[in-house]
Image: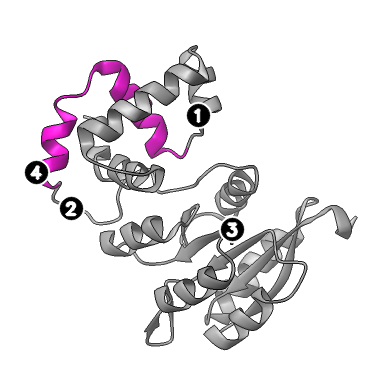
Amino acid sequence: MDRARRKIFLVDDHPIVIAGLAAAIAATEDLAVDGSVSNAAGALRRLRQSPPPDLTLFDIRLGNHSVFGLLQEALAEKPGLPFAMLTASRDWDDLRRAIESGARGYLLKDELPLRLIESIRRILDGGNAFPETAPATSLRIPDRLASGFHALTEREREVLRYVAQGYQNKEIAQALNISVRTVETHRANLSDKLGVNSAVQLASAAIELRDLLNS
């Protein structure tokens, strides 16, 4: 059965966090822990090995160091590395940097284990898992985004809400009962109006605009 399980590699220097998440993963029938390390050198050593883990979860900080330097080095060697953040940080800059680095999720450590497992599965199935609201409570939306937001049609806002929740084009199409091609057109219009140039930047903008989307 272990061979059918998808492998999760943990990079975190808090033993209690690793122990708790490892126990939750071990209780599932479809996931398994692929090992854990507490430092950058150990993480790079494992990620250079084959076969790679199906998903790597990184803490934002290892000791006194940010993990983003490690991510840059790892992604230079493994451009398609599937990873997400597992963190206690509610700093908007951390979330934004994670998205811009290519993270497929931003999982908060104080979530219930069941919710974390659900988020991990969603990422492994090709989706994303980001907080329902931006971590920073005092986030100020940049003027360019606010201006672009007010130029959106109601349908474009609907699509953007799903983008903020990490839905893929096919899922958005099914939810709104429209074609995937129509979703792609809406996403192109959203990118143009919000002044972004990639799917990653659009996801970041969608999260940044969540308060307006939900108002």
**Which residue is labeled 1 in the image?**
169
* Distance between mark 1 and mark 3 Cα atoms: 19 Å
State if disc 3 and disc 2 touch (CB < 8 Å). no
**Which residue is labeled 2 in the image?**
139
Residue 1 highlighted magenta (yes or no): no
Q: Is mark 1 on a helix, strand or loop?
A: helix
Which tag, 1 or 3, sits closer to the chain's start?
A: 3
Which tag, 2 or 3, sits closer to the chain's start?
A: 3
The mark found on residue 82 in the picture is 3
In this rendering, is residue 206 above or below 48?
Answer: above
Q: Which residue is drawn at 12% across and 42% down?
A: 144
Which tag, 4 or 3, sits closer to the chain's start?
A: 3
Q: Is residue 39 visible?
A: no
Q: Is mark 3 on a helix, strand or loop?
A: loop
State if disc 4 and disc 1 touch (CB < 8 Å). no
Q: Say which amino acid is labelled 3.
A: Pro
Which tag, 1 or 4, sits closer to the chain's start?
A: 4
* Distance between mark 4 and mark 3 Cα atoms: 32 Å
Q: What element carries label 2?
A: loop
Q: Of tags 2 and 1, which is closer to the observer?
A: 1
Q: Say which amino acid is labelled 4.
A: Asp
Instruction: Report the predominant secondary structure element of the magenta stretch.
Output: helix
In this rendering, is residue 88 above or below 143?
Answer: below
Q: Position of residue 32 (x, y in %)?
A: 76, 62
> Based on the displayed image, in which of its 4 quarters is residue 46 positioned?
bottom right
The magenta stretch is 142-166
Q: Position of residue 63 (x, y in %)?
A: 43, 87
Q: Say which amino acid is labelled 1.
A: Asn
Which residue is at the front of the view, 91 or 112? 91
Q: Which residue is drawn at 56% across and 53% down?
A: 116
Q: Say which amino acid is labelled 2.
A: Leu
